[in-house]
Every structure is written in structure tokens, then in C-alpha cells.
Amino acid sequence: MKCEVNIGDPLRNYAFYSVPAVLSYNKGREFGTVIAESKNKLIVIDDENIREHEYLIPKTKVHHCGDNQVRFNISQNTLKEFEI
């Protein structure tokens, strides 16, 4: 799995498929799956089957991308701001 975050390239759509999304501030807790890229944001869902929570998180909130995961520089409380 190649993991890229092209913050300056808004034309790359659907670059991610089933990459774990992790909160850096919460001891690396996985909270969902990055399923796609839309302009300058990443689309994250908490469960690919139920899709109870869906998030649209700016790429500027990505702390690290590697080890087959995307780490976001946000807290659990802040995560609610990005829910759609």
C-alpha cells in the first residue's frame, strides 16, 4: 500500500482505499478508515459496513503518513468538528 498525501494537488481524487485513520493525540487510537481524497480533504468512515460516522478532514491535519496508516494531528474532541 502506497500512502501519499499531496496537500498541494487538489486534482488527485480517490487516492486512498482502506487505509487506517489514527489519532496521534490519543495514543495512536484507530478511529476509522481513509477511503478517498476530495480536493484538499480526506474522507474517513468509522466502519465500512455501517458508516455510522463519516468525516471530512483537511489534509493540513495529517501528522504522519506511513506504516500503512494515516495519523491525524487532532484530538477525539476535535474530531467531532469534522463529522459530516
Image (cartoon, rainbow, N blue to C red):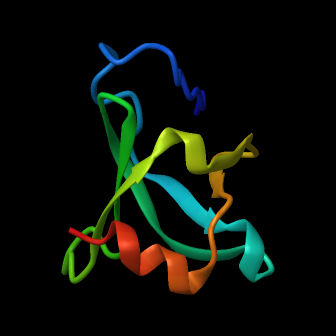
User: Residue at position x 39%, y 45% from top?
Assistant: 42
Residue at figure coordinates x 36%, y 66% from the top left: 82
Q: Is residue 35 above or below residue 25?
A: above
Above or below residue 61? Residue 44 is below
Image quadrant occupied by the N terminus: top right
Task: Decide: is 52 above or below 25.
Answer: below
On screen, residue 43 versus residue 71, left or right, reads left
Residue 67 position within the rendered picture, expressed as x and y whole percent measured from the top left: 75, 45
The residue sitting at 73% across, 81% down in the picture is: 26
In the image, taking residue 28 as reference, residue 30 lies left or right, namely left
Outermost right residue: 27
Of 1 and 16, nearer the camera is 16
Query: In the displayed structure, does residue 11 sit left or right of residue 62?
Result: left
- Quarter of the rendering containing residue 20: bottom right
Q: How many marks?
A: 0
Q: Which residue is found at the position 30% from the left and 28% from the top?
A: 39
x, y (%) of residue 56? 32, 55
x and y percentages locating residue 74 in the rendered image: 62, 67
Q: Quadrant of the C terminus?
A: bottom left
x%, y% of residue 41?
Answer: 37, 41
- In which image quadrant can residue 36 be found? top left
Closest to the observer, 76 or 30: 76
> Taking 17 as reference, is 5 left or right?
right
Location of residue 64 with respect to 82 vertically, above or below: above
